[in-house]
């Protein structure tokens, strides 16, 4: 599937806010003092470890917003898997602008590449099975659109973007409603005709109750591989099956082998380590 870039109108407020945070009350006093106003430079964004690229448009916008005369030439587009030492892009323009935007550009780029890289590792682990790797709402406040884009760059797919995408009935909803059936009935009465309903279940008995209510999807939470296998057989294609809990690149293959449709992974957005990328003069 072709990776569609995010519209500029979505990313520009985030980049502007990050630049303003860094510029503070007086701007880049170090670069302004040391670098002549008319100096130009050519720099490269280069990986320092293997990984998958995501967020080049965001990084490029950081340079452009500081000085529209900067030019970025992409060598490897988002979604590319690179080795350590590979050049990702070349950046040219006023030297002061490149140095001023450097940290903001790298903060976004390294973080998003880290998410894409970790997503790709889990996707690779399940490539012989039908299961898709999906992210969750466990994202950095304000950066959800960017982080979910990075998941797509790594070959994953997106779960809900927010509370208004679909109905997801979790354990606390059930506890307050009293039981699964009541929770589903109330959700169905309040949801629009386009809304899907998913229910989180911890046991096979709960799964049986959810299926009896004809839900669209079931979230099989923290089940063992044996339980997941039995759960998929119980569902028999009547609902989408999603496994969640204790998913790593090492455990994902066995989880996928149970036949689940989706495997949701929260840590690929909330805890992915950055991919080390540098901006170096050439």
Image: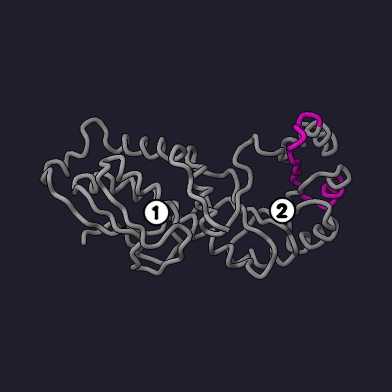
Observer able to see residue 118: yes
Which residue position holds label 2? Answer: 242
From the image, which quarter does the C terminus lie in? bottom left
Residue 88: quarter of image: bottom left
User: Residue 21 — which label?
Assistant: none
Observer able to see residue 34: no
Q: Position of residue 52 (x, y in %)?
A: 46, 61
Q: Secondary structure at mark 1?
A: helix
Residue 36: quarter of image: top left
Q: Is 144 situated left or right of 84 in this image? A: right
Question: Does residue 256 lie above or below 66 as drawn?
Answer: below
Question: Does residue 140 lie above or below 188 as drawn?
Answer: below
Residue lying at 66% horizontally and 56% vertically, measured from the top left? 263
Q: Is 280 situated left or right of 79 in this image? A: left
Q: Which segment is the magenta one?
A: 189-209
Q: Position of residue 56 (x, y in %)?
A: 40, 52
Which residue position holds label 1? Answer: 110
Within 10 angstroms of label 1, few (less than 14), some, or many (20 or more) residues? many
Q: Position of residue 34 (x, y in %)?
A: 11, 46
Question: Does residue 167 lie above or below 262 as drawn?
Answer: above
Residue lying at 33% horizontally and 68% vertically, measured from the top left? 85
Residue lying at 53% horizontally and 53% vertically, measured from the top left? 151
Within 10 angstroms of label 2, few (less than 14), some, or many (20 or more) residues? many
Residue furthest right in the image: 212
Q: Secondary structure at mark 2?
A: strand
The answer to if 78 sits in the magenta stretch is no
- Mark 1 vs mark 2: which is more N-terminal? 1
From the image, which quarter does the N terminus lie in? bottom right
Residue 44: quarter of image: bottom left
């Amino acid at each position: 599937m072709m990776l569609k870039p995010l519209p500029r109108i979505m990313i520009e407020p985030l980049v502007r806010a990050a630049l303003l945070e860094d510029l503070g009350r007086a701007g880049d006093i170090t670069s302004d003092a040391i670098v002549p106003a008319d100096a130009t430079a050519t720099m490269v964004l280069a990986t320092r470890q293997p990984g998958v690229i995501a967020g080049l448009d965001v990084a490029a916008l950081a340079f452009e917003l500081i000085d529209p005369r900067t030019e970025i030439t992409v060598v490897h587009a988002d979604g590319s898997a690179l080795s350590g030492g590979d050049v990702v892009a070349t950046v040219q323009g006023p030297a002061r602008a490149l140095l001023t935007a450097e940290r903001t550009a790298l903060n976004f780029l390294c973080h998003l590449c880290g998410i894409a890289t970790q997503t790709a590792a889990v996707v690779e682990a399940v490539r012989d099975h039908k299961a898709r790797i999906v992210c969750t709402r466990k994202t950095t406040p304000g950066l959800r659109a960017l982080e979910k884009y990075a998941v797509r760059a790594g070959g994953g797919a997106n779960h809900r973007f927010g509370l208004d995408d679909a109905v997801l009935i979790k354990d606390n909803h059930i506890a307050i409603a009293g039981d699964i059936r009541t929770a589903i009935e109330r959700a169905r009465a309040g949801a629009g005709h386009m809304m899907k309903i998913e229910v989180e279940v911890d046991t096979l008995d709960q799964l049986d109750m959810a299926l009896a209510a004809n839900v669209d999807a079931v979230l099989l939470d923290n089940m063992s591989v044996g339980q997941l296998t039995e759960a998929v057989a119980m569902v028999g294609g009547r609902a989408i099956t999603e496994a969640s809990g204790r998913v790593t690149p090492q455990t994902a293959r066995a989880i996928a082998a149970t036949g689940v449709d989706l495997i949701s992974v929260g840590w690929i957005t909330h805890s992915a380590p950055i991919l080390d990328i540098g901006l170096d003069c050439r």
